[in-house]
Image (tube, rainbow, N blue to C red):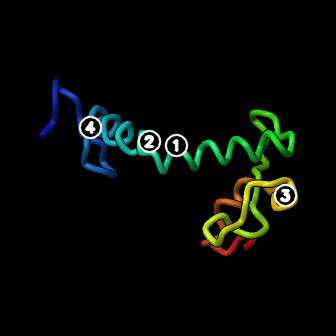
Amino acid sequence: MAEKGETRDKSSHRTPGQIKRMNAGYDAKPSQIQKRVELKKGRRMLGLAKGDPRDAAHIKPARHGGAATKANLRPLHRSKNRGWRDGGDK
């Protein structure tokens, strides 16, 4: 149901207020906070400035036990690093 006269988003069928509350709860989860911390730590180690289109990519993925150390990180364009499921760099 639309709240306070808000119109629903056509793609998600939620109002902007509902989307904001949903995202706020997700982003506050300890697992998401830890992922953000690790990403920022890797970017700092590689010297990537804010706004740089490159990202800190793990050579051995973190989900397989790869650490966020300088030896295990390399700069890679964000679209390649985050889009590996779509045929980008593995």
Return the mark for residue 74: 3
Of marks 2 and 4, which one's residue comes earlier in the chain? 4
Asked whether disc 3 touches disc 1, contact meaning CB atoms under 8 Å apart, the reply is no
Query: Which amino acid lies under the numbered mark 3 shown in the image of this protein?
Result: Arg
Secondary structure under the numbered disc 4 in the rendered image = helix
Question: Mark 2 sits on what residue?
Answer: 27
- Element at label 2: helix
Q: x and y percent of residue 86 in the render?
A: 62, 72
**Can you say whether 38 is above or below 61 in the image?**
above
Q: Earlier in the sequence, mark 2 or mark 1?
A: 2
Disc 2 to disc 3, C-alpha distance: 26 Å
Q: CA distance from mark 1 to mark 4?
A: 21 Å
Which numbered disc flags the more N-terminal residue, 1 or 4?
4
Q: Amino acid at mark 4?
A: Gln
Q: Is residue 82 above or below residue 7?
A: below
For disc 1, the marked residue is 33
CB of mark 2 within 8 Å of CB of mark 1? yes
Residue for badge 4: 18
The residue sitting at 30% across, 43% down in the picture is 9
Look at the numbered disc 3 and give the secondary structure of its residue: strand
Which residue is painted at 85% across and 45% down in the image?
46
Query: Which label sits in the foreground, 1 or 4?
Result: 1
> Which label's residue is closer to the chain start, 2 or 3?
2
Q: Nearer the viewer, mark 2 or mark 1?
A: 1
Mark 2 and mark 3 residues within 8 Å of each other at the beta carbon: no
Mark 1: few, some, or many residues within 10 Å (few <14, many ≥20)? few
Front one among 60 and 79: 60
- What is the CA distance from the residue labelled 3 to the residue labelled 1? 22 Å
Q: Secondary structure at mark 1?
A: helix
Name the mark on residue 84.
none
| Mark 2 → mark 4, Cα distance in angstroms | 14 Å
